[in-house]
Amino acid sequence: MTTTFYHHWRDVPASAWRWPNFSPAEIACRGTGKLLINEPALDKLQALRDRLGKPLIVRSAYRSPEHNRAVGGAPASKHMQGTAFDIAMANHDPVAFEAAAREVGFLGLGFYPRSGFMHIDLGPARQWGERFPECPVPFAAEAPPAREVLAQSRTMKGSGAAGVATLGAAGVEVAQQVLTETQTAILPLVPYLDALRWLFIAVALGGIAVTIYARLDDWKRGRR
């Protein structure tokens, strides 16, 4: 027997279900819970899943006659025979999906790009609807970052110079104070140390200026 009917998908024995990537609830009628198991159709659906290697999100599979009327389905819809499936394209390339569906034996194809799904069935070869547009590349090609070698970085050089000079200026000031307070014998050196401190301050300011310039230039070039 190639078809089996159940009044509710919960009535399906575990031993009767042999399609590992699908469940009775996924294939059952969305409106009534009834289920018609069409084995050849489910075999092809599983083959399609195996070929694509990724989940198939089933929007609609079997429809009971009353539910088919309620949703405005075609009077002779293949859904009522359990041989049709509406599959979401959210996680598929429609072109690759269509090719795989044809290869496993689904010859009836309906395209619904506005609703985001494709209809496949085992009816005669035919197709309808407007094909899905080509999928744009989701992300622009990422160019390799134009980073400077750390040892040659202008930012690092400027920051390093500023840091060293700042520490030097502070050290000279401390030494100057110590010499002024405790080493009166070498007071003549204090003016020279004062000049040296200002030299360090000038170097620090120059380093800060180099750092700011480098960061602005990198920003203009799109560097980070």
Image (cartoon, rainbow, N blue to C red):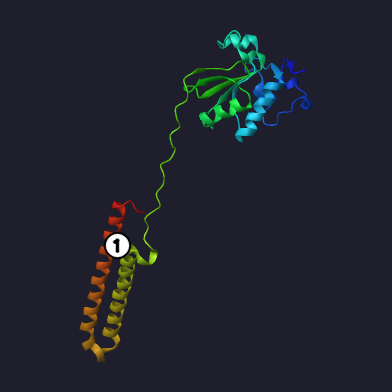
Question: In the displayed structure, does residue 83 sit left or right of residue 117?
Answer: right
Pick the residue in front: 178 or 13. 13
Pick the residue in front: 76 or 65. 76
At horizontal 30% and vertical 83% (from top left) the residue drawn is 178
Element at badge 1? helix
Q: Quadrant of the N terminus?
A: top right
How many marks on residues? 1
Q: Residues within 10 Å of mark 1 (few under 14, many from 20)?
A: many
Residue 90 shows up from this direction: no
Residue 203: image quadrant is bottom left
Q: Position of residue 224 (x, y in %)?
A: 36, 54
Q: Which residue is mark 1?
A: 211
Residue 219 shows up from this direction: yes
Pick the residue in front: 158 or 184. 158
Task: Name the amino acid, label 1.
Answer: Thr
Q: Position of residue 121 (x, y in %)?
A: 61, 19
At horizontal 65% and vertical 26% (from top left) the residue drawn is 45
Q: Position of residue 223 (x, y in %)?
A: 34, 53
At horizontal 21% and vertical 79% (from top left) the residue drawn is 195
Question: As displayed, is residue 113 above or below residue 63?
Answer: below
Question: In the displayed structure, does residue 73 sit left or right of residue 193?
Answer: right
Q: Position of residue 19 (x, y in %)?
A: 71, 28
Question: In the displayed structure, does residue 88 sit left or right of residue 222?
Answer: right
Residue 124: image quadrant is top right
Question: In the displayed structure, does residue 90 sit left or right of residue 137?
Answer: right
Question: As displayed, is residue 176 above or below residue 154?
Answer: below
Pick the residue in front: 218 or 118. 118
Farthest residue toward the bottom? 185
